[in-house]
Image: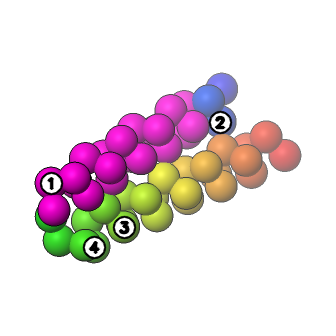
Amino acid sequence: MYSLLLMALAGLLIGGAYTFYQQKTARWIPYSFAFLAVMSLVAAYLFTQ
């Protein structure tokens, strides 16, 4: 159950990263969203183990 929620969170974070990248904001904002999305996917993978 938690892995599904974390994967959904990762999808939202990737969408946010893409949106901030399109808006030409500071580079660290979309990179941090993408990093958090990857960490969320890693956590979801670890919950399935």
> Closer to us: mark 3 or mark 1?
1
Find out whether the residues at labels 3 and 2 contact each other: C-beta distance under 8 Å.
no
Residue placed furthest toward the right? 49
Residue 2 visible, this angle: no
Q: Which mark is residue 47?
A: none
Q: Secondary structure at mark 2?
A: helix
Q: Position of residue 22 (x, y in %)?
A: 22, 53
Q: Secondary structure at mark 3?
A: helix
Marks 2 and 4, how far apart at CA: 27 Å
Q: Residue at x 36, y 58 (%)?
A: 33
Extent of the magenta region: 5-24
The kind of residue on which mark 1 rests is Gln
Q: Which mark is residue 3?
A: 2
User: Which circle's residue, 3 or 2, is located before the other in the chain?
Assistant: 2
Marks 1 and 2, how far apart at CA: 30 Å
Circle 1 residues within 10 Å: few <14, some 14–19, many ≥20: few
The kind of residue on which mark 4 rests is Trp
Circle 3 residues within 10 Å: few <14, some 14–19, many ≥20: some
The kind of residue on which mark 2 rests is Ser
Find out whether the residues at labels 1 and 4 contact each other: C-beta distance under 8 Å.
no
> Which residue position holds label 4?
28
> Closer to us: mark 3 or mark 2?
3
Q: Which mark is residue 31?
A: 3
> Closer to us: mark 1 or mark 2?
1
